Image (cartoon, helix red, strand yellow):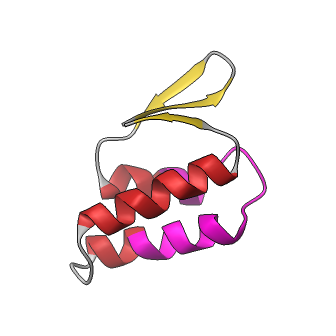
Amino acid sequence: MKLETRVGQVRLIASAEEASDFLLNHWPTEGGEKHLLARRACVEALAGSIPASLARKAFIEACEESGMHVVP
């Protein structure tokens, strides 16, 4: 998926691992409730505890919570 983190700044996320790294190390805003849920979901998806589709959904919701535009 592609997301616009700030006006004119685009980032490509292609896996739960990349999403997890972005959530942990490159998140551009103060993390909210959905950010924390997405972090947990990505870790669980990487461990095989939940489907990647659930982590993807949580990641998109966290991006939207932070005002980022997501292009699935």
Give the residue furthest to the bottom: 49
**Horizontal side, residue 6 vs residue 14: left or right:** right
**Horizontal side, residue 22 vs residue 41: left or right:** right
**Residue 28 magenta:** yes
On the image, the x and y values in percent for residue 51 come to: 23, 72
On the image, the x and y values in percent for residue 43 come to: 39, 74
Dividing the picture into quadrants, the one containing residue 28 is top right
Up-down: is 28 above or below 34?
above
Q: Which residues are magenta?
A: 22-41
**Residue under the point 56% across and 60% down:** 24
**Horizontal side, residue 18 vs residue 51: left or right:** right
**Residue under the point 40% across and 59% down:** 57
* Tally of marks: 0
**Residue under the point 37% across and 57% down:** 56
Dividing the picture into quadrants, the one containing residue 5 is top right
Up-down: is 71 above or below 17?
above
Q: Main secondary structure of the magenta part?
A: helix
Up-down: is 36 above or below 71?
below
On the image, the x and y values in percent for residue 17 come to: 33, 57
**Residue under the point 58% across and 48% down:** 63
**Residue 32 magenta:** yes
In this view, the residue in front, 49 or 60, is 60
In this view, the residue in front, 69 or 20, is 69
Give the residue furthest to the right: 30
On the image, the x and y values in percent for residue 66 come to: 70, 49
In this view, the residue in front, 34 or 48, is 34
Quadrant where the C terminus sits is top left
